[in-house]
Amino acid sequence: QLKKITNNEGNSIFPSLSDDGTTLFFCSDFESKTPKIYEYDLKTEKMHKITESGFCVSPSYCSKTNMLAYCKMVEGKMQLFTYNRSTKEHVQLTKDLASKEECMWSPCGTYFLCEIKNGDKSTIGLYNTITQTYKILADEGGCCSYPSWSGRYNEYPA
């Protein structure tokens, strides 16, 4: 049975559920008309805003690291950020001229995939949290979006 959990006039999108099924992460524009990242405790039914400023979308939670990856608009370009739920620290990972969107953690918690846009072209990038670099996985001349991982693999094949 479906149950409405956001009772406001905003748009709530990009849901990401914790592995234990107790916390839902999403973005919504109900407070400021600019999307922010929220977490919602499904047991207590309490909501907490994670990002306070900026245009923030595409949360992806990783249970292995207890971190959230998300995209935030910085100087007109979407950049990759992480949020450490234990320390409450936000870290900007990318600072280049390409826009990154729709990030998705790997099952092992070391990588995430994202769409990388340059003008009207888009591709899929693999971001390595250890080396703090990303590489292009798909043809840069096309239009690739909405990357996803298979839960079957716990590491990225070399």
Image: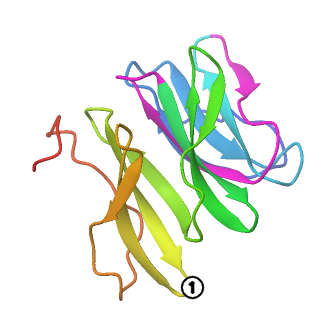
Up-down: is 69 above or below 125? above
Tell me if 136 is positioned left or right of 119 in this view. Answer: left
Stretch of the chain drawn in magenta: 44-66
Residue 58 image position (x, y, % from top left): 56, 50
The residue drawn where x is 47% and y is 33% is 61
Q: Between residue 65 and residue 24, name the one nearer to us.
A: 65
Count of marks, rendered view: 1
Residue 131 visible in image: yes
Colour treatment of the image:
rainbow
The residue drawn where x is 17% and y is 45% is 156
In the displayed orientation, state which residue is furthest to the front: 131
Up-down: is 135 above or below 19? below
Number of residues whose C-alpha sits closer than 10 Å to that of mark 1, classed few (under 14), some (14–19) or many (20 or more)? few
Up-down: is 66 above or below 138? above
The residue drawn where x is 37% and y is 24% is 19
Check disc 1 and report the residue beneath it: 119
Tell me if 153 is positioned left or right of 57 in this view. Answer: left
